[in-house]
Image: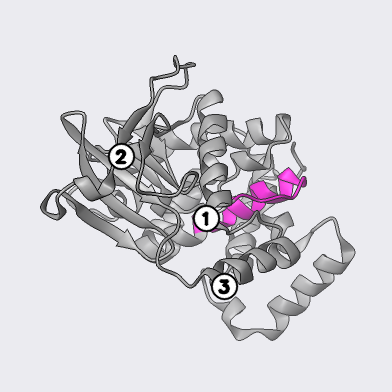
Amino acid sequence: MSDSSAQPQREKPVRHMRLGDIPESDREHLAGAGNWLWKIPFDGGFGVLKVYLGNRNPMLHVRKTMGNLVLTGRTSHMPHARCKMETETVRIWEQHGFRCFGMHPEVTFDDLPDGTYMLFDFVEGLHFKNYFKDASVPLDERLATWRRWLPEWHRRHRAALDHDEPRLIHENGDVKHVMLVDGDFVYFDFEIAFRSRNVRDLVGRELLAYLRSVGKFFGDTMYETMMDELVQHYPDPALLMAGWEHAFHNDSLTIRAARKLDFALKPRHKTKYSKYRVALDLKKRLDARSLTTRGR
């Protein structure tokens, strides 16, 4: 998939297609659980048709929606809602100068229900998940890419705070959801968003989610190195304290007490890459730099 310009685009004329008219030999099925994804011919190249209906039991969407709305503070899991949320969120990220997969809302598929699909551009790129563990890329080059990305990560966190916009925080944020395309950073997967207005806490949550995925996917050595680079090169190290605050110092005394109990009582939270252990790792490094002042 490719990026799309952050500049306003002139509305394109509606184009009608039918998925059923595309021979099965010309479709590549990329995934099919919560969503169906097909790589299909489009405009002399390829596009990716994302259908949010998937093949799950409809009641699962209802149960997940109830859990999201009541328990986890997320938006609806219903197919129409996820399609609408992804479209809106891509536009928000683009407006703030972040590159996302190019969308084609002008393309309609007459054999699919309205509001349940989107056609995206397709290009080749490197997922962070694969790039940073690729030993064929010199370590210095990979770390230079990480240092180059950190100011962009911070800029998004700052924009989310300044505009009180939780949709600028990636609900599914980790190293699987950033790509390198021609040297630029491209973002994707925005079907679900947080509803909380405590954006600083969401920044902290995303910080921990990315760092946990660094450890899980790249191993101990890269985790330690990339964590050190983060504390050294993230433009506002004081804002990194939001990660520790998310795990141990929530504004709600009830949530804070519950998390302390959660950390103390559940063995899985003692593992190296639990959110609590990663939060403590981060604070240890920040304490060493005497940057414990809260920043916003």
Q: Position of residue 103 (x, y in %)?
A: 40, 33
How many residues crowd around disc 3 within 10 Å: few (fewer than 14), some, or many (20 or more)?
few
254 relative to 288, above or below:
below
Indicate the amino acid at tag 1.
Answer: Pro
For the residue carrying disc 1, how many other residues have a C-alpha within 10 Å: few (<14), some (14-19), or many (20+)? Answer: many
Amino acid on which disc 2 is placed? Met
Q: Nearer the viewer, residue 162 or 225?
A: 162
The answer to which of 246 and 71 lies nearer the viewer is 71
Residue 187 at x, y = what percent?
Answer: 43, 40
Let me know if residue 258 is in the magenta part.
no
* Principal secondary structure, stretch drawn in magenta: helix
Q: Nearer the viewer, mark 2 or mark 1?
A: 1
Mark 2 → mark 1, Cα distance in angstroms:
21 Å
Q: Please tell me which of labels 1 and 3 falls first in the chain.
A: 3
The residue pinned by badge 1 equals 79
Residue type at mark 3 is Met
Q: Residues within 10 Å of mark 2 (few under 14, many from 20)?
A: many
Callout 3: helix, strand or loop? helix
Q: What colouring method underlies this structural image?
A: one colour
Q: Residue beneath label 2, please? A: 1
> Where residue 280 sits in the image (x, y, percent)?
64, 63
Magenta-highlighted residues = 193-211
The residue located at (80%, 73%) in the rendering is 258
In the rendered structure, which disc, 3 or 2, sits on the residue that comes first in sequence?
A: 2
Camera-side mark, 3 or 2: 3
Position of 141 compared to 64: left or right? left
Q: Which residue is mark 3?
A: 59
Q: Position of residue 131 (x, y in %)?
A: 28, 49
Q: Secondary structure at mark 1?
A: helix
